[in-house]
Image: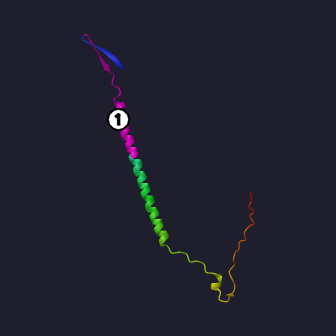
């Protein structure tokens, strides 16, 4: 707010300075935003590093653990089985496909 103050025949205009607190808030708000951005980046980096360590740990665990043995075929377990017996086979017969001719 502008007020006129008469002083020995001359008029001076002075500004009412009530914005000191507001100026401080405006100046510090940039620092606050920057601090929040830095904290978010640090948290993001820590999470990525933890996920990378966890992934590496689980990968080595999967690679080092013993594989489950494959189930043996019944003919190999039973010596009295007929060796001429063939395993079941599946045959596919082609379906009649009618192609239109122009």
Looking at this view, is 84 or 3 the one in front?
84
Instruction: Say whether residue 54 is left or right of residue 69.
Output: left
Q: State the residue lying farthest toward the bottom.
A: 80
Main secondary structure found in the magenta portion: helix
Q: Where is residue 35 in the image (x, y as percent from the top left)?
A: 37, 44
Identify the residue shown where x is 44% and y is 56%.
48
The vertical placement of 47 against 31, above or below, is below
Identify the residue shown where x is 65% and y is 84%.
75
Q: Is residue 10 magenta?
A: yes
**Which residues lie in the magenta part?**
9-37
Q: Does the magenta stretch include residue 20?
A: yes
Give the residue at mark 1.
27
Identify the residue shown where x is 43% and y is 58%.
50
Q: Where is residue 78 in the image (x, y as percent from the top left)?
A: 65, 86
Q: Specify the quadrant of the image occupied by residue 96.
A: bottom right
The vertical placement of 66 against 75, above or below, is above
Looking at this view, is 84 or 17 the one in front?
84
**SS for callout 1:** helix
Q: Specify the quadrant of the image occupied by residue 16.
A: top left
Quadrant location of the C terminus?
bottom right
């Amino acid at each position: 707010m502008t007020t006129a103050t008469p002083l020995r025949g001359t008029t001076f205009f002075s500004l009412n300075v009530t914005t000191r607190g507001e100026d401080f808030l405006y100046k510090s708000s940039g620092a606050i935003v920057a601090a929040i951005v830095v904290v978010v980046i640090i948290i993001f980096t820590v999470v990525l590093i933890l996920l990378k360590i966890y992934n590496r740990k689980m990968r080595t665990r999967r690679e080092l653990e013993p594989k489950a043995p494959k189930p043996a075929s019944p003919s190999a377990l039973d010596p009295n089985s007929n060796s001429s017996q063939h395993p079941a086979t599946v045959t596919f017969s082609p379906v009649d496909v009618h192609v239109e001719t122009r």
